[in-house]
């Protein structure tokens, strides 16, 4: 009887041989960890929080070692499991989505000890597919109201707020349109700032024509028409990253914020140069103290609530941010009224805001960073920064240096106050650890 010969196995191609050598399970797990990190980074939060989310996902999918280098727009991730290592790079574009930050933060804290990679990815898909919380028409109204409220905090009157409302609404609408068309960011910021300023001048001139005399507080509202362009999230998270010595993320984030501020300042300055707007500060609001303080308190809340809505902050958290802004801004206004230096008053206000955000976030299970950034709107020295540029344009070097130094001191005071509050309420900020060591 003839012996039956086994059929020869078909030859293995180079591609199939490479596929057999690839650690496919590690690849899938690495991908889901990196995706969670890029989603968090793309939403605008700090490098520390990005690493925390990635570490939580890594533990859940069974990755034993993780090391992540986080910059402003890029993550270089190296993972290891059972002696096998894999490095992967992910990129994202600068943007802000506070609701996504909150959902990813909650997602990372609700992950079980172990879960399949497919299930984790399904959760990330659900977060990624969430629509924005506010319709466009409502955002336009809230942003315009926020800009008008900042004008009140800058000693503007009813005429200034009346001119700002339509100017900011139209400029913000154009800004959204140009952003969706993916035009150059700096060109969009410059154009939007110039349009907001020009429209404010036009509407203020129309009010003057109707009333027959110019407003002595006209300059107070000039910068406020474009205040929605200030890069609040990059500025604050850059300060927090630098405080923790996360230089790879903090330095480029700060550079990005500075470029946006410069484009905004140039747009406003162009209109100021053509119209001859005076950069000198205006006097404090006058009238019955009860009425003035009611206006300041209401403006503090509305400014922060509108700005928070623009960042897609959940309504419950936006209301909390507005209330905290009142708690922080009232002492600041009192200190300024007593003649205390602006940077000292700002430092005190930011410490109070930081502590209040930490406590409220802990009590009501909210995310601190998305509460903190909008509340700082009441302290940002936008008017003094503009005055610095205009003084330089007018060759008034002494006034420009004085205004510039004051602006820098206030910005430093904001970061110092917020960082100090974070160190008192969060051990991750009080102790600096080597990146990746606590994330395994």
Image (cartoon, grey):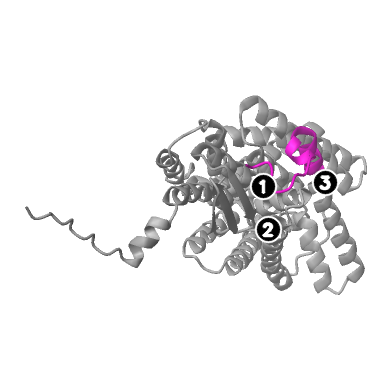
Q: Residues within 10 Å of mark 3 (few under 14, many from 20)?
A: many
User: Depth check: 274 or 215 in front?
Assistant: 274
Q: Are marks 2 and 1 in contact (CB under 8 Å)?
A: no
Measured in 3D between alpha carbons, the distance from the residue under mark 2 to the one under mark 3, in whole angstroms, is 17 Å
Q: Which mark is residue 167?
A: none
- Mark 2 vs mark 1: in front: 1
Residue 291 seen from this side: no
Q: Quadrant of residue 439?
A: top right
**Percent position (x, y) of residue 239?**
75, 51
User: Which region of the structure is painted magenta?
Assistant: 416-440
Alpha-carbon neighbours of circle 2 within 10 Å: few (<14), some, or many (≥20)? many
**Callout 2 secondary element:** helix
Residue with the most extreme front position: 1
Query: Residue at the spot x=47%, y=49% of the render?
Result: 26
Is 37 magenta? The answer is: no
- Label number found at residue 416: 3
Residue 439: say if magenta: yes
SS of the residue at dot 1? loop
Residue 403 visible? The answer is yes
Q: Which residue is mark 2?
A: 253
Q: Could you say where residue 190 lies in the image, as x and y percent from the top left?
A: 63, 67
User: Counting residues from the N terminus, which is met first, the one under dot 2 or under dot 3?
Assistant: 2
Mark 1, Cα crowd under 10 Å, few <14 / some 14-19 / many 20+, is: some
CA distance separating discs 2 and 1: 20 Å
Residue, x 60% and y 65% (percent of image)?
Answer: 195
For marks 2 and 1 on the same chain, the one whose residue lies earlier in the sequence: 2
In this picture, is 280 found above or below 434?
below
- Determine whether 187 is above or below 313 in the image: below
* Residue matched to label 1: 436
Give left or right: position of 370 versus 422.
Answer: left
- Percent across and percent down for residue 305 are 62, 40
Secondary structure state at the residue bearing disc 3: helix
């Amino acid at each position: 009887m003839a012996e039956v010969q086994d059929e020869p196995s078909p030859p293995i191609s180079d591609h199939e041989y490479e596929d057999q050598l690839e650690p496919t399970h590690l690849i899938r797990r690495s991908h889901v960890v990196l995706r969670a990190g890029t989603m968090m980074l793309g939403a605008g939060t700090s490098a520390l929080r990005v690493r925390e989310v990635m570490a939580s996902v890594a533990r859940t999918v069974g990755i034993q070692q993780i090391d992540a280098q986080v910059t402003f727009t890029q993550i270089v991730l190296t993972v290891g499991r059972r002696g096998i290592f894999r490095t992967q790079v992910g990129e994202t574009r600068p943007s802000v989505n506070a609701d996504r930050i909150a959902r990813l933060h909650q997602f990372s804290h609700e992950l079980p000890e172990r879960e399949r990679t497919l299930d984790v990815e399904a959760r990330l898909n659900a977060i990624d597919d969430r629509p924005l919380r506010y319709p466009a028409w409502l955002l336009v109204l809230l942003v315009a109201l926020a800009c008008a409220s900042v004008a009140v905090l800058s000693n503007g009157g009813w005429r200034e707020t009346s001119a700002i409302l339509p100017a900011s609404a139209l400029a913000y609408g154009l800004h959204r349109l140009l952003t969706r068309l993916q035009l150059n960011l700096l060109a969009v910021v410059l154009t939007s700032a110039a349009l907001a300023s020009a429209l404010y001048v036009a509407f203020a001139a129309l009010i003057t024509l109707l009333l027959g005399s110019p407003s002595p507080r006209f300059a107070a509202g000039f910068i406020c028409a474009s205040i929605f362009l200030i890069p609040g999230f990059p500025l604050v998270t850059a300060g927090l990253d630098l405080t923790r010595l996360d230089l790879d993320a903090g330095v480029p984030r700060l550079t990005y914020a500075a470029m946006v501020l410069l484009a905004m300042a140039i747009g406003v300055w162009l209109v100021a140069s053509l119209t001859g707007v005076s950069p000198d500060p205006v006097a404090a609001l006058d009238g019955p103290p009860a009425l003035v303080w009611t206006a300041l308190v209401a403006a503090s809340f509305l400014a922060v609530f509108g700005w928070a809505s623009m960042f897609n902050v959940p309504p419950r958290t936006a209301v909390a941010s507005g209330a905290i802004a009142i708690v922080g801004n009232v002492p600041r206004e009192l200190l300024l009224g007593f003649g205390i230096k602006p940077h000292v008053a700002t430092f005190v206000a930011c410490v109070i805001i930081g502590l209040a955000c930490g406590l409220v976030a802990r009590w009501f299970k909210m995310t601190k960073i998305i509460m903190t950034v909008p509340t700082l709107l009441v302290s940002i020295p936008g008017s003094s920064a503009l005055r610095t540029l205009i003084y330089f344009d007018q060759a008034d070097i002494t006034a420009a240096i004085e205004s510039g130094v004051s602006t820098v001191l206030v910005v430093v005071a904001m970061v110092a106050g917020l960082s100090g509050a974070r160190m008192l309420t969060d051990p991750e900020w009080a102790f600096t650890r080597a990146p990746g060591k606590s994330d395994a």
